Amino acid sequence: MIRQDIPKLLKHIEAHKPYITELHNTIDIFHGNLRSHVLNVLYETLDARSYEAAKDRVASINTLQKLIEKLSRIYQHEPTREVENGTEADSELLSEYEYHFKINETLNGANEMFNLNKTCLLEPFVDEKTRKPKLKVIENDKFLVYSDDMQDPTRMTHVIIFEGKQEVMTDKGMTEKAVFRAFTDDEFLLFDQDGNILQDRMNAMGNPEGINPYGRIPFVYINRSQYELIPTLDSDVCSMTILISLLLSDLGYAIKYMAFSLVYGIDVDMTNVTRAPNAFLELKSDIEGNKPELGTIKPEVDIDQVMQYTMDLFSLWMNTKGLKAGAVGANENNASGFAKMIDQMDASEARTVQVEIFKNSEERDLWELVFNYLHPYWVATGMIDLSAQFSANAYVSVHFHDQKPMFNRGQLVEELKAEVEAGFLTKKMAIKRLNPRMSQSEIDELVAEIEGEKAITIPLFGGQENDNQQENDTEQ
C-alpha cells in the first residue's frame, strides 16, 4: 500500500535532491535568469574589486533558449490526429479535446521540457470553474517518478508531485514543511516531508481513503532513456550555457580596459601634472641628474581570436546535441558570424528522432489515458460538460510533418536549375521543391506568369525595336 511506501518515497526524494537542484538551475536559465548564474561564477572566481568591475559587463546571451527552440519544433507544423475504429462522433469529441487541451501549444511546451531534461510529464485534468478538460506540463523540478517493479525497473509505478509548502504548528512554533502528492494505479496520498499523512486535506477533497478512482496513474511520463527510469542529466547543459556567456563577458571586461591607456612615470615629480587633452606637461626629475620619462601602456586583447574560439566551442557543443551549425566564412569570425551560425543550425535529424518518441509514446499514452480512463470517469461523475463517450475500441493515430533539413535557397536554386537544364526535372517540379507550401494551382499560376513575362518584348528607345520587328514581319 502507498501508505507503507512513504518511508522509501521520502528516501527516494532525499537521494535525488542534487538532481532536482540541477533541474531547477537548468529550467531557471531556460526561463531567462542566466545573469544571476553567471554572476555567481564571477563572484567565486574573481576578487572583490575585479568582480565589481566585471559584473556590469555581463553578456547575458542565452544560447540555451536558442538550442531548445531549434530542437523543439515538431509541433510548429500542426500534426493531424484521426480516430481509428471509431465514428464521426468520436472524431468530433477528439476535436473538442484538442481545442480545450490547446493540444499543440501544450505539447510544444512538453517537447521543450523533454529536450531540456530528457523527460516530461503531462497532467490532464478538469477545470472546476469551466467544467472543461485541460492539459498542463509539469516542470521537471516539480516531480519525481519511482519504480518498485523488480522485473522492469524502468516501468513507473509511482508519481510524486511537489505541492509546495504549508505552514504547520510545531513545538517550536509555526514552520514550513514540503508537501507531496503521490499516485499509484490504485491509490492517492498527500503527505509532508516528515511522512505525516495530510488527512484533513484528503478529507476536504472527498477522498479520505486515498483511492485512485481512475484505475491508472493519471499522468503521462515520457523518457528518452531506455535503460534508466530517471535518466542521467547531461552535465553540459548548464555549464556550457554559462561558459559561453562568461567568455563573451570576459571580452566585455577586457574591452572596458582597452579603452583606457595606463599612464606611467619614471623619475617624475607628478605633483603638478595635469591630465587633460590640451595640457602642457613640465616634467622634473625626482632624482637629481636623472632624465624624467612619461609613457603609456595600452592593453591589447585579440578579440577576433577569442570570438572565434567561442564560436568553435559553441559549434562543437551544438553538434553533440544533434544540431549542424551553419557554416561561417573566414571573414565572419565576429558577432554577426556568430548570430548567422546560430540562425542556420539544422536540427532536422534530432527532430525526426523526437517525432518517433512523441508519436509512439506521448501521444499514444495520452489519448489512451483520456479515452479509456479519464473521460469515462469524468462523464460518470458529472465533472465535465462533455457527455458523449468514445467508442470502445477507438484510438488515435497521429501524423507529423516531415522534419526537412534546412537549405540555402540560393544554393538550391542553382541545383534545381542544373537539373532542369539536364532534363532531370520539369520546371513545375523545381518550383514545387523550392516552394513546398505552394498548392498545385498556385504553382500553375506562377509558371504561367513567368512564361508570360518572358513573352513580353520590351521596346528600345525611339521605338527602334518595334520598327525592326515590323520589318521582319513584312519579310516573312
Image (tube, rainbow, N blue to C red):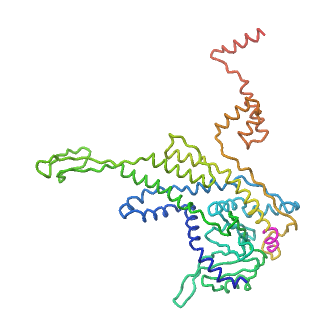
Looking at the magenta stretch, what is its main secondary structure? helix
Rendered residue at 83%/75% (across/down):
380
Q: Quadrant of residue 19?
A: bottom right
Q: Report how many numbered discs are placed on residues in the image.
A: 0
Residue 179: where, in percent of width, then height?
62, 79
Q: Give whichever of 450, 170 is nearer the camera.
A: 170
Residue 169 pos. (x, y %): 56, 88
Of 20 and 104, nearer the camera is: 20
Q: Residue furthest left?
A: 288
The residue at the point 11 percent across, 50 percent down is 288
Q: Nearer the viewer, residue 88 or 111?
A: 111
Q: Quadrant of the N terminus?
A: bottom right
Q: Is residue 131 magenta?
A: no
Depicted 130 relative to depicted 278: above or below: below
Is 377 magenta? The answer is yes
Q: Residue furthest front?
A: 151
Q: Residue at x 20, y 44 (%)?
A: 280
Q: Is residue 215 above or below residue 340?
A: below
Range covered by the magenta-colored residues: 369-378
On screen, residue 458 versus residue 297, left or right, reads right
Residue extending farthest to the top is 475
The quarter of the image holding the C terminus is top right
x then y, percent, for residue 470:
73, 12
Identify which residue, 259 or 207, lies in the foreground: 259
Q: Position of residue 387 (x, y in %)?
A: 83, 70
Q: Is residue 220 left or right of residue 295?
A: right
